[in-house]
Amino acid sequence: MSYGQGEPPWDPWKPGSQQPQWDSSTPDWAALAEASESRNRRRRLLLVGGAALATVAVGAAVAVAIVSSDGDSRASQSPSGLPATADIPSGTADPTPSFEPTSAPPPLDPKDFISSVKKDTAPLSPDILFPGSQLTMGERVYRKGPTASTTDCASAAQSTLPAVLTKNKCTRLLRVTYAKDGVAVTVGVAVFDTEAQAAKAKTDADKKSIVASLSGQGVPTFCRTAICRSTTNSFGRYAYFTLAGFTDGKDVTTKDAKVFTTGDDLAEFTFRQIRRRGEAQASAAANQ
């Protein structure tokens, strides 16, 4: 039986001191096996750890690639990694169509149509400018009386007004009278070719520049000898005048509020009618 390679056999009948001694260099097979197993365990751990690190590295590379392809740094700005509220799609399926900006033409100015005879071409008469049979201003109702129209402007004016109208080339003078409770007022509308002529007529007129009162149709003669209240104004190519007084011939004083109110109502109404004339012509031109 061989117990080793070239080693003397063990003799069980000899004392230990006489037994052959084993070479101390003989390998410890158990220790070697344990060491080998330890190395194998470390190798396996290194392989597993390396695979895990490789997986993490690949994941990081993919994440970097995703962030890089996004083209901005929103992921670093939002803790959740979501885009800011303004960047989140609204969920609308179809985008709102866009159109090229357009600019509408400016509206036509009504005053342009009543400032020159070239544009102010609508029909004109006392009954067109002052329609109906009565006028209501607030709670006051005025009955419409006689009307008149003449191209001889000076013939329908008194005192200093005939010269003013002639000097500034008045082409036509329209008149209408309204009455209420013993008070009557005549409105005179002088027509010129241009706004400048009408404005000059207003400037040239003085306190004695009055339109001749118009009586008839139940309105007696008034304001021919008595003191009456008059006004002067202009708008566009029109200058307009009022003369208000008592139908019984009594003089007007500063305390006669009823006369002043009647004159102011008719002056206001005349202005509105001239302005409406411009508005109507501007509207018609815009719709052509």
Image (tube, rainbow, N blue to C red):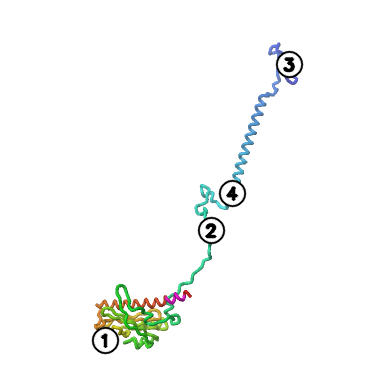
Q: Give the range drawn in magenta.
A: 280-285
Q: Does the magenta stretch include residue 136?
A: no
Give coordinates of residue 48: x percent, y percent: 62, 36
Residue corresponding to mark 1? 225
Name the mark nearer the viewer: 1 or 3. 1
Distance between the alpha carbons at the discs numbered 4 and 3: 75 Å
Q: Do the residues labelled 1 and 4 touch (CB within 8 Å)?
A: no
Name the mark nearer the viewer: 1 or 4. 1
Distance between the alpha carbons at the discs numbered 1 and 4: 102 Å
Dot 4 crowding, Cα within 10 Å, few <14, some 14–19, many 20+: few
The amino acid marked with disc number 2 is Pro
Q: For the point 35% across and 78% down, which residue is it?
A: 132
Q: Which of 46 and 59 is in front in this view?
A: 59
Residue corresponding to mark 4? 66
Dot 3 crowding, Cα within 10 Å, few <14, some 14–19, many 20+: few
Residue corresponding to mark 3? 9
Q: In this view, does 203 lie to the left or right of 53?
A: left
